[in-house]
Image (cartoon, rainbow, N blue to C red):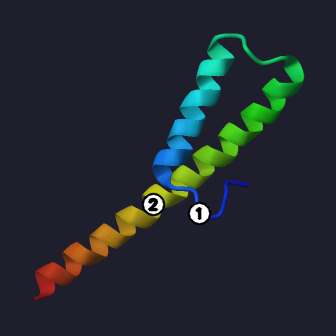
Amino acid sequence: MAKKNLSYSEAIAEVESIVERIENNELDIDELAKNVKRVAELIKFCKAKLKSTEEEVEQILKDFDES
């Protein structure tokens, strides 16, 4: 899975790097499978981070409206 202290920006940068390597045919078949799996893990991490941030922002706005 993604590194424990990985930031959203780092995850996106890693995905972009892997996609670029795939597009440039820089990966052999063994590396391709490994890298596609890594991209899937990173996307899952990013989706969770976005959902968490969205919930946090909604709570802040809710608290703001109540004050």
The amino acid beneath tag 1 is Asn
Residue 66, placed above or below residue 7: below
Is 29 left, or right, of 16 in this rendering?
A: right
Quadrant in the picture for residue 25: top right
| Quadrant of residue 57 within the rendered picture | bottom left
Instruction: Specify few, some or many for label 1: CA neighbours under 10 Å numbering under 14, 14-19, or 20 or more.
Output: few
Give the number of the mark in front: 1 or 2.
1
The numbered disc on residue 5 is 1
Please say if 17 is above or below 29: below
Q: Are marks 1 and 2 in contact (CB under 8 Å)?
A: no
- Ranked by sequence position, the earlier of labels 1 and 2 is 1
Of 48 and 3, nearer the camera is: 3
The structure residue drawn at horizontal position 63% and vertical position 14%, both measured from the top left corner, is 23
- Secondary-structure class at tag 2: helix
Q: Which mark is residue 42?
A: none
Q: Return the x and y of residue 29 as percentages of the image width and height.
A: 86, 19
Residue 8 at x, y percent in the picture: 48, 52
Quarter of the C terminus within the rendering: bottom left
Q: Residue at x 51, y 41 (%)?
A: 12
Left or right: 8, with 28 as reference point = left
Q: Residue at x 67, y 54 (%)?
A: 2
Q: Amino acid at mark 2?
A: Lys
Q: Residue 51: give its label.
A: 2
